[in-house]
């Protein structure tokens, strides 16, 4: 089988060929590694690509074990028997720790930092047999919606190299879309899995808060962050989640849930299910092509026997403002640890302690991170805490109640993932508010701690459009069931962007 043929397969298809011994694990690995070596100079999805002999797998897992886990994985939360990902190459967003591999979070301030331990998500994938291909580019400390805020270089969208892949997990989304990884992990604080998945035409899931361990994920906003997968189709998403989900005693926010075989929920039966279509998600500001694709998908869902009715999430308009108070506040506390004293970048020269802190942070953090730290510090300061942070937490409660009221009537909600398709590189870099508005439909899901699944539902201006399904807490099986049914009915599964090993080289400006 040709290497191009191997990398075009889904995880489920690859596992089937491995079981039939039509390909070997080493052949799969080489195919992805060769494609990545050829394509990544154009797309720039990866920050770290260890040599092939340095690959990690469940058979050769190395590195130090965190307290409570034995060297052979003893104490690791059990992985479902159906969750084998043996020999499947995957990519990892560079804000998750892997022993012996640099972790930069897309920032200069973590220059030279190599974690001594593995994130629980990585150990669970090791236990399932997956092989780490490399670590992907991201907006610095996950603060961004375009992958342009990386301290190293921007990542490009495989559908059009002049467009952004979305953010902050843009590298992971681009790697999966371009078949440079069979699947990838990202983190979603306000849409950072779902928005880039929509822009790049892949499936992305933000799980229920607490369903996937955050141990080993470098924190941005601790009450909002959640690790989630990027995959080529809904089936693969269910397979990866079967390996990832489960309680972790090392994460105090981990939900006491046992491992689940999410693939068992993949049946195309939605007849009788009731869906709410929030009018706030289909109003002013949505691109006409995005609206049309979502409306077509809703019509298809109704044709499958589901009921779709308009509903309201009245506090949606407050979501962006609420998020950009709470998230920066938590970030200002979480990022205080990066001071140049223990690890990472330290300003050169002889400095007094306070001067060292200030110079290190000034030189090490990028402008977007500085902006959010300053916002967060301000809203937590004396005299402003009640006016901003406390009020934002009250509005967060109202957002949660909106969803609770909706789920009293509906099984799930449906709507666009993003108001537009992917935009041009540089288009919003000088307009932070416009950049923030890209996440207007995804932020409320994080504020409420709910699961959100995005899948391709059509195209606008030749670019993929994402459809978002939102479920109640721990409603992932329902989302997979509906996504699987829609994927088949829409006929849009594992769409391929035009980028290929034979694609013309980008311009000198683009290659830099």
Image (spheres, grey):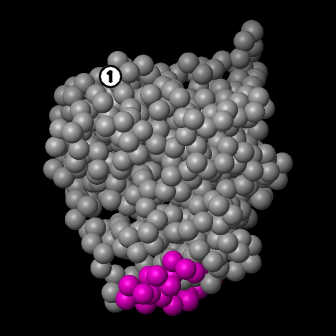
The answer to whether residue 78 is visible is: yes
- The front one of 39 and 4 is 4
Identified at 22% across, 65% down, the residue is 264
| Residue extent of the magenta highlight | 295-315
The vertical placement of 218 against 512, above or below, is below
Identified at 33% across, 27% down, the residue is 56
Q: Residue furthest right?
A: 430
As for residue 197 lying within the magenta part, the answer is no
As for residue 312 lying within the magenta part, the answer is yes
In the rendered structure, the answer to whether residue 130 lies left or right of residue 91 reads: left
> Mark 1 highlights which residue?
63
- The front one of 333 and 123 is 123
User: Quadrant where the C terminus lies?
Assistant: top right
The vertical placement of 125 against 309, above or below, is above
Q: Secondary structure at mark 1?
A: loop
Identified at 36% across, 28% down, the residue is 30
Q: Position of residue 398 (x, y in %)?
A: 57, 76
Q: Residue furthest top?
A: 350
Identified at 55% across, 65% down, the residue is 466
The answer to whether residue 373 is visible is: no
| Label 1: how many Cα within 10 Å (few below 14, some 14–19, many 20+) | some
In the rendered structure, the answer to whether residue 455 lies left or right of residue 141 reads: left
User: Quadrant where the N terminus lies?
Assistant: top left
């Amino acid at each position: 089988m040709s290497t191009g043929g191997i990398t075009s397969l889904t995880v489920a298809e690859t596992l089937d060929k491995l079981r039939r011994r039509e390909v070997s694990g080493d052949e799969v690995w080489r195919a992805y590694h060769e494609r990545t070596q050829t394509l990544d100079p154009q797309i720039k999805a990866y920050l770290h690509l260890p040599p092939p002999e340095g690959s990690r797998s469940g058979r050769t897992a190395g590195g130090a074990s965190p307290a409570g886990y034995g060297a052979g994985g003893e104490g690791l939360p059990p992985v479902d028997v159906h969750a084998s990902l043996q020999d499947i190459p995957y990519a990892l967003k560079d804000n998750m720790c892997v022993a012996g591999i640099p972790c930069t979070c897309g920032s200069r301030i973590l220059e030279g930092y190599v974690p001594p331990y593995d994130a629980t998500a990585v150990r669970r994938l090791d236990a399932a047999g997956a092989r780490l291909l490399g670590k992907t580019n991201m907006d610095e400390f996950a603060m961004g919606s375009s992958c342009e805020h990386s301290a190293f270089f921007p990542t490009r969208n495989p559908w059009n190299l002049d467009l952004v892949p979305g953010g902050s997990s843009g590298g992971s989304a681009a790697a999966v879309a371009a078949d440079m990884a069979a699947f990838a992990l990202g983190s979603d604080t306000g849409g950072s899995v779902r928005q880039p998945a929509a822009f790049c035409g892949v499936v992305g899931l933000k799980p229920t808060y607490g369903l996937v361990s955050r141990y080993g994920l470098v924190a941005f906003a601790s009450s909002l962050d959640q690790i989630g997968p990027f995959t080529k189709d809904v089936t693969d998403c269910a397979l990866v989640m079967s390996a990832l989900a489960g309680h972790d005693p090392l994460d105090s926010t981990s939900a006491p849930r046992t491992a689940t075989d999410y693939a068992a929920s993949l049946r195309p039966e939605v007849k009788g299910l009731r869906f709410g279509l929030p009018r706030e998600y289909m109003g002013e500001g949505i691109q006409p092509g995005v609206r049309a694709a979502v409306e077509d998908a809703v019509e298809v869902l109704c044709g499958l026997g589901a009921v779709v009715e308009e509903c309201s999430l009245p506090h949606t308009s407050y979501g962006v403002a609420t998020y950009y108070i709470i998230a920066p506040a938590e970030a200002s506390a979480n990022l205080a640890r990066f001071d140049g004293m223990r690890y990472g970048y330290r300003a050169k020269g002889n400095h007094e302690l306070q001067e060292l802190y200030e110079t290190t942070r000034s030189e090490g953090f990028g402008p977007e991170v500085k902006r959010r730290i300053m916002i967060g510090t301000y809203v937590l300061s004396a005299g402003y805490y009640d006016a901003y942070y406390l009020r934002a937490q009250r509005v967060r409660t109202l957002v949660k109640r909106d969803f609770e009221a909706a789920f009293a009537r509906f099984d799930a909600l449906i709507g666009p993932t993003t108001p537009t398709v992917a935009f041009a590189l540089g288009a919003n870099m000088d307009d932070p508010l416009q950049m923030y508005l890209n996440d207007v439909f995804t932020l409320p899901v994080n504020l409420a701690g709910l699961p959100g699944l995005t899948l391709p539902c059509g195209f606008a201006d030749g670019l993929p459009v994402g459809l978002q399904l939102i479920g109640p807490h721990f409603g992932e099986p329902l989302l997979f069931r509906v996504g699987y049914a829609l994927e088949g009915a829409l006929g849009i599964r594992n769409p391929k962007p035009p980028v290929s090993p034979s694609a013309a080289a980008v311009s000198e400006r683009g290659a830099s």
